[in-house]
Amino acid sequence: MTIHAEGLVAIAVFYLLILFVGIWAAWKNKHSGEAEGTDRSETIMVGGRDIGLFVGGFTMTATWVGGGYINGTAEYVYLPDYGLAWAQAPFGYALSLVVGGLFFAKPMRSRGYVTMLDPFQQLYGKRMGGLLFIPAFMGEIFWSAAILSALGATLSVIVDINIKMSVVISALIAIFYTLVGGLYSVAYTDVVQLFCIFIGLWISVPFALTNAAVSDITVTAVKRVYQSPWRGSIKKEDTWMWLDNFCLLMLGGIPWQVYFQRVLSASSATYAQVLSFLAAFGCLVMAVPSVLIGAIGASTDWNKTSYGGEAPKDKDEAEMILPIVLQHLCPPFVSFFGLGAVSAAVMSSADSSILSASSMFARNIYQLAFRQSASDREIVWVMRITIFVFGGLATLMALGTGTVYGLWYLSSDLVYVIIFPQLLSVLFVKGTNTYGSVAAYLFGLVLRIGGGEPYLHLPPFIYYPGWTTEQQKNKSGEMEEIIRQRFPFKTVSMLASFFGNFVFSYLAKYLFESGKISHKYDFLDAVVSSRSGEIMDKTTLVTRGNSIGLSELASVKPRLSVTLAAAFTRRDTLPEETVEEEEEESSPDFSHNEE
């Protein structure tokens, strides 16, 4: 096995740069928040809520622009049966950030939450918050695994070393500086990450375009030269499946802790919205070189290159098309610079998902569900332990997974069909309760899993209209039959979950309040209990409420006569006569006013 010394040196330089920036950020901000009395654990999670426009814009863009994004986009543009038409991530995630900024960033940031799960526990209780943690956690781990998988593939091309070794080393470095600096290290390394990707790829693209083995990409976009046109097309029978996947990216890209981690760290609610819009533009800009590299790969006569022999798609190496193009179509010094920069950048993007998962566990599971009396020091240590454990889980998954896009869609599916409709309900729909939330969870889960998952070899038990069978080559090179669901069952599952929450919440409310079901059977304390001990209180969820100005709050009429606890009493659980007395001052299920 040949070790490319120049590539190894390039990687070492860029890795040391990322590591230095991560440690420097931790040192620079080690006393951040102390003057305001902020807990150390909260500073690790949301960075003292003082992330400015410059760093915030970069770190918000890096929510999605990472290893999976740049490698996956190039891969799908290159694949003959897909092309640019099926490379949905750039526009899907850009629109996701726009929608998130328009509707979700302001209410979440202005209410002073620390994690995405806080509003769920506040309205539905800590047990339901624990259930919703499961798909959120799986999404973050799958995403981290996708990033590390892409990184291992890239490194194996650069220095021809074992993929497993490169993944483990990269994960350890990312875990180390995340342990040291939390969100500050994540945010500052994101700035370096995007600069590395942008400069590294744009330096390489002109050399690859002018390589003698590459045909004019404007011709190969519409005409068959070495393979099908890279522009791609959408067959009529695949239209609904295309729309289903696009909605998954656009709406399923919102309810992620990795996104709200940035939103909640912004210095104000307005800044959180602006950062989302800037990041949407950044996502599109950062996708351009990946699209060009995928097009170059589809326009190359590989027999005329040092790669030689069959094209990457024929060797089942399509997912590595970006590092292959940089390695074999660019001069060595350009190739090593581009690949080294991209590798270091990819490595640094795994950190935020690992931090997100550990933040949700430490706060919403360990602290709020089991140990509400836990000290700040204890929470910090729980976060450090879980950062290491979750980083290890993501690494193990990265060592045994399939294509980058397969991991991408898989991680988004559970978040899309389960968490997104619940987030809509908890923020914008009046009257939902824990019974509806449980029903919505089950509806989304059963309908999604019922459609099967080819990447997990999970056969469907619900055959939606338009399903077909296809032959697909597995990892061992053998052909196997899979079921392809052409019906938009993911979006249907999401809608069923949303309406299920609404219907079952009001059904439970009617049955208990009308006396058709005895109050003693309200075992979730979600309807007849005037103040359930299961429901979180703002004094528990938000420790720094006084730092949030009234001008940032959602548009709710001020009610200066109520106490802090009463402002968060769920009015739909109050006796009927009490509700009638306050009819003129009706408000959402949980208000967010300050004294």
Image (cartoon, rainbow, N blue to C red):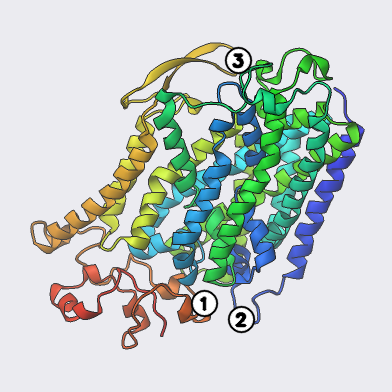
Secondary element under disc 1, as helix, strand or loop, is loop
Nearer-N-terminus badge (2/3): 2
Q: Is residue 524 left or right of residue 254?
A: left
Residue 146 sits in which quadrant? top right
Q: Is residue 516 above or below residue 587?
A: above
Q: Is residue 456 left or right of residue 488?
A: right
- Circle 1: residue type: Arg
- Residue 182 - label: none
Q: Position of residue 556 (x, y in %)?
A: 35, 76
Instruction: Give the Cα separation between the discs numbered 2 and 3.
Output: 58 Å
Nearer-N-terminus badge (3/1): 3
Instruction: Give the Cα separation between the discs numbered 2 and 1.
Output: 9 Å
Please state which of residues 114 and 483 is positioned toward the viewer in this rendering.
483
Q: Find out whether the residues at labels 2 and 1 contact each other: C-beta distance under 8 Å.
A: yes
Q: Which residue is mark 3?
A: 476
Q: Is residue 272 above or below residue 341?
A: below
Please state which of residues 299 and 134 is positioned toward the viewer in this rendering.
299
Please state which of residues 531 and 491 is positioned toward the viewer in this rendering.
491
Q: Residues within 10 Å of mark 3 (few under 14, many from 20)?
A: few
Instruction: Give the Cα separation between the discs numbered 3 and 1.
Output: 55 Å
Q: Position of residue 62 (x, y in %)?
A: 64, 52
